[in-house]
Amino acid sequence: MRNFSDYDPFAVSVWFFAVTGMAMFCNYPVLMLISLAGGILFFLVRNGTKHAKSHLFFFMLFAVLAIANPIVSHNGMTVLFVVNDSPVTLEAVLYGLNSAAMIVGVLYWFRSYTQLMTSDKLLSVTGRLSPKISLLLSMALRCVPMLRRQADRTADAQKAMGLFKDDNIIDDIHGNIRVFSAVTTWALENGITSADSMAARGFGTGRRTQMRKYKLRRSDIIFMAVTIGLLGVCVAAAAHGSFEFGFYPLTDRICPDTAGKFGIAAYALLVSVPTIIETEAALKWRYLKSKI
Amino acid sequence: MEILKVKDLNFTYPQCSSPAVRDISFTAERGEFIALCGATGSGKSTLLRLLKRELVPLGDMSGSVMIYGKPVCDMDGRTSASSVGFVMQRPQQQIVTDKVWHELAFGLENLGTPPDEIARRTAEMASYFGIGSWYEKDVSELSGGQMQLLNLAAVLVMQPDILILDEPTAQLDPIAAADFISTLKKLNRELSLTMIVVEHRLEDIVPVCDRLMVMDKGSLIADGSPENVISSLKCRPDILLGMPAASRIFASLGAEGVCPLTVRQGRDLIQDRYSGDIRSLPEDAHGHGSDPALEFREVYFRYDRYSDDILTGTDLKIFTGEIFCILGGNGSGKTTALSAAAGLLRPYSGHIRVFGKKLKEYKNRSLYNNCLAMLPQDVQTVFLKNTVREELSECGADIDSFPYDMEGLLDKHPYDLSGGQQQIAALAKVLAAKPKLLLLDEPTKGLDAHSRREMTDILFRLREQGMTIVIVTHDVEFAASCGDRCAMFFRGKVVSAGTPRTFFPQNSFYTTAVSRMTRGIFDNAVTVEDAVRLCRANSGKEDAL
């Protein structure tokens, strides 16, 4: 009865890469459609109607990608019309739509993924692979905003001391270069303190361990097993050749064989796992509430 | 039980002729709370680093450091890292990771502790320190005091035998600093943790420590209970400068008996021996120009549309030729007011006038030419070059007219200077723009008593040259000794203002130690010098005022 975002970050990551991996390595239009629709739906379920700008951006990207292909590529047998002596073909249009769906779908998924994977979760996933990488990442995550704040403060300090003599661009650039060099020095100087603080707490005395903030629960294992099972069906279908699809010179017709049908069903199920989880959680909460 | 034994310790830095630490021997019992003090450059920090094997600087070392009778250099890496805990001065730079919980776990992760035990120990430590509510936060969201508490907890989670702290409160405001010291006392009392603390703000720590050690030029010149050490150092006013006010009054009066350390003990001393008919000092003539140098009229400011007002109709008038101190707690809007005066923030309503002219009318940054300059809180943001000399010549500062001898500092890297020297070098740089109005944000942060006095002298001389100085500070004692007028800021407004001798005796809590000590005995004693003058007058040693 957990929200999808409460599932173990590692399991969530496996699921994400299963969904996007299938979308990226096949070009079967049905899968693209499922991935795009699922990606948009999942983003909407999590964010509601917020982020209108993101949607607009993705729509524009979709349009650009879909139009670009027929302009550049003139392969294909079915000529729709001719612009400036170059033919625009139906096949190229379909291919453009298909790849635009693929790219935009995957971008939607990654947008949701970055929302779900807060730095804690990212660290816990990388930490399972290597505690060292995880520490490096953690330090980097802290360093970037810290340097930025220091740069802002330095610029303010210099301004109030009359460093930027005149109000023009050249003077501003000069000033900013000097601020940058000062912040670099500051970072190096303070790096020494951090290094001391790390040495004082036994860094480099041997193998590191990693504190585990997330404990694997039964539902995580079930989720992971379901993900891998469904992915297995999809991969088997792909290996069988059911997801091969040609656009040129004549676009194939969509008529999946039995393996393909199973593969499509499995992928559709895989994509809807989080929606099922969220709905289940919502229903259970409602049920619990009515009891209270 | 003897926990730490230091024997004949000597240390010389490379390319230095004289040793930084000279023939030091002492032992510490389990559960002792030791305060170590001394002037800048007396070798305190070097001594502390010699006690922590991982931080021993490069140089020639002789003598031995033993913990539980075992030489530190023979321990294996993990034992040595965990048996001595070390907390440094700068809260932010000591933090390594980006989350509070990760920082707590960091030391244990390094030691290869099993994950379940890390979880248990960090949870325990977080509950003990009340970190639970910010356990999941980003470290960048914490205040300085919280960061330093986190550093302390992150060291304690490794269960050290000895805790060493190198000026842990230098970068904190006085209230956070007092909280931190009382946390140390609590740890000492409840866990019987052995602690060695270097401090130069001794008002808070001396009354609670068991033992006071004083270093001078690399040697240990006094070691014992705080009362005895202060009594034996009566002839060293330079060292006593940082001690609690009560003990300084005691020493200046040359009184006999047990040295008082706290406000209560000081009060008893004055009440018993020096109370008399002469209750107040004559008010010094307070001279300033008649024109306002800086004026706030109904100023409102907030950081964004939906946040609360930080400045809530601030009205303030500061006249030419005075030193004006703005006091107030954290988040009262003092620093915001200063940034607004410097034109770095723009109020959404009201006017700020500098020398009678609205800020808006200073076009093309003319505000910062021969008019106004601000020294920010973190002076490291001021320095851009590799030596102080380059720093000053770049902006055309006139070293000769600066009321302090900079000669010794000129060829050093600004970051290698001590806190006090950094502040002075930064001040010299700010003055290059020849401001008539100088804004200072926390100029005494991280300064020892000696540097604070130097800073006061410099400011007085600048005032004589006709400069108007506005200081935002937490440091009540500093404001009392250098301000012509002081004002209290609360929730974005000035709630009271006046000369130190009228302002501080009105306040009951937000006031100097001397004012609290002499309340009801004297009427307007604010600084140690005031109290000493009044005591002398009452005991007949000095002519009536």
Image: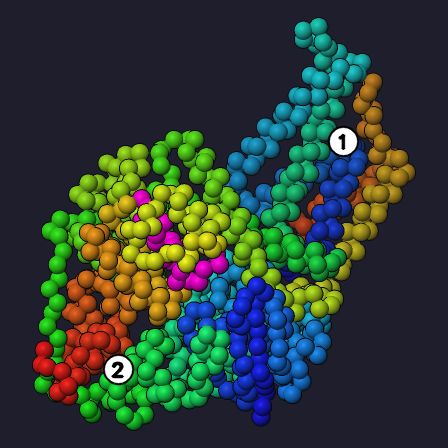
Q: Which residue is mark 2?
A: B252
**Number of the label disc, if any, that sits on residue A29:** 1
The one nearer the camera, A51 or A170, is A170
The one nearer the camera, B489 or B214, is B214
Q: Relative to residue B410, is residue B209 depicted above or below?
A: below
Chain under disc 2: B
Amino acid type of disc 2?
Ser
Name the colouring of the figure.
Answer: rainbow
Q: Residue at x 56, y 53 (%)?
A: A188
Residue at the far front in the pictured view:
B17
Q: Relative to residue B528, is residue A279 depicted above or below?
A: above
Is residue B345 covered in magenta? no
Give x and y (percent) for residue B46. Answer: 53, 71
The secondary structure type at the circle numbered 2 is helix
Amino acid type of disc 1?
Pro
| Mark 2–mark 1 distance (CA, rounded to whole Å) | 91 Å
Q: Which mark lies nearer to you, 2 or 1?
A: 2
B427 on left or right of A118? left
Is residue B422 covered in magenta? yes
The secondary structure type at the circle numbered 1 is helix
First to last magenta residue range: B415-433
